[in-house]
Structures are given as structure tokens and as C-alpha cells.
Image (cartoon, grey):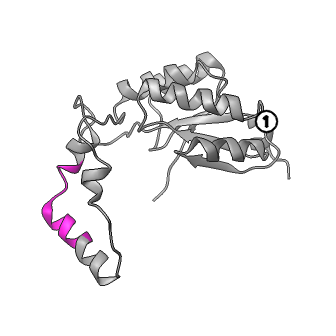
Amino acid sequence: MKSRICEMLGVDFPLVAFSHCRDVVAAVSRAGGFGVLGATAFSPNQLDLELKWIDDHIDGKPYGVDVLIPENLSIKHERDVTTHSLAERIPPQHREFVQELLIRHGVELTHAPHEENYRPGAGLSLQEEGALKLLEVAFQHPIKLIANALGVPPQSMLALGHRHGVPVAALVGA
């Protein structure tokens, strides 16, 4: 089942799997598809470690990296945005609505998601500057694609892809 995307990415079949899990990325690529690591939640140092692991476990198969640079976002020009600071902005009525849904459908949580998953100081590279730092790290590895997971990539991302000879993808959807 060869197609143009198979030729472009150097894969056996047109399956592209986006995951934050390095194991999934490596497994998909080893199996003949194209794994793409979601990098936004990683610091540059952690991303380097994740990509080194992938490099060591992917048998030379191609893979890519995706970041989030939203075109339209209320925090676009803010600095030092963290998962914790974003979680703090969720209105109480939204939290209450979710809690009511969980109770109504018998879903039991062992901990509050905002306490466990959104720890203070945790970085989140939603601004172009932070995402570009991640891409600088990514280009130190043999990646074959970069993707912006939230719409049209900014010009800086397109320029990086062009400079490194790597296709740039944009993900859209509703």
C-alpha cells in the first residue's frame, strides 16, 4: 500500500501515529509506519533524553516530532506559562460540571487531576519561543518531520524545516 506520503516519509505504509510515549513512536516506526513524538510537555533536556532513547530503539527507521504553537490563543504573548497556571484559570463551574459528570457515570478518581498532573513549575511550551527551543533539540536527532499540532505553523517553524530539509506538517480538525 504505497502512496506519496510513504515515499515522502520513507515508510512502508501510510500510518502516522502521534504519541507522547516514546515506546509507541518507536514501535510504530519499527513496524513500518511513522511515529511522531509530541514534545510540548517536555523540557529541552528531557526531550533530548526521549529522542536519544528513540534513536537507540528505532532500528534506523524514520520518525518525527510535533509541537504546539497555537495561532490564536489568549496566552500567546504571555511568558512563563505553566500547566499549573493554566489549571488555575479553569472556572469553578467547569470543575463542578466535570465532577457532576464523573459522579453521574460512576467514574472514580484516585486523586484530583489538577493536583497530580499539573504540578507547580511544570513547563508547557505553547509559545513559539519555547517550541522553537524544543525544535532546536529535535534537529540534533535524525528526525524526518516536524509538525505543529494546532493549525498553521508559524514562519519560523517553516524556515527551520526548510533549512534542515525536513517537511513541516500542520494538524487541523474539530
Q: Position of residue 7 (x, y in %)?
A: 80, 38
- Say left or right for 11 vs 23: right
Q: Position of residue 96 (x, y in %)?
A: 18, 70
- Seen as rendered, the residue at the extreme left is 92
Query: What residue appears at the point 70 percent right and 47 percent down from the top-left corner?
Result: 28
Q: Provide the residue designation for mark 1.
A: 10
- Say left or right for 23 vs 125: right
Residue 144 visible:
no
Image height check: is 43 above or below 14?
above
Image height check: is 100 above or below 77?
below
Residue 34, image quadrant:
top right
Q: Look at label 1 and name its amino acid.
A: Gly
Residue 105, image quadrant:
bottom left
Query: Image quadrant for the C terminus?
Result: bottom left
- Say left or right for 7 vs 28: right
Between 125 and 4, the residue placed more toward the observer is 125
Q: Position of residue 48 (x, y in %)?
A: 52, 25
Query: What residue appears at the point 53 percent right and 46 percent down from the top-left corner?
Result: 171
Label 1 environment density (alpha carbons within 10 Å; few <14, some 14–19, many ≥20): some
Asked if the magenta segment contains residue 48, the reply would be: no
Between 83 and 129, the residue placed more toward the observer is 83
Magenta range is 87-98
**Which secondary structure dominates the residues rendered in magenta?**
helix
Residue 69 visible:
yes
Query: What residue appears at the point 62 percent right and 31 percent down from the top-left corner?
Result: 53
Instruction: Look at the numbered disc 1 and give the secondary structure of its residue.
Output: loop
Asked if the magenta segment contains residue 95, the reply would be: yes
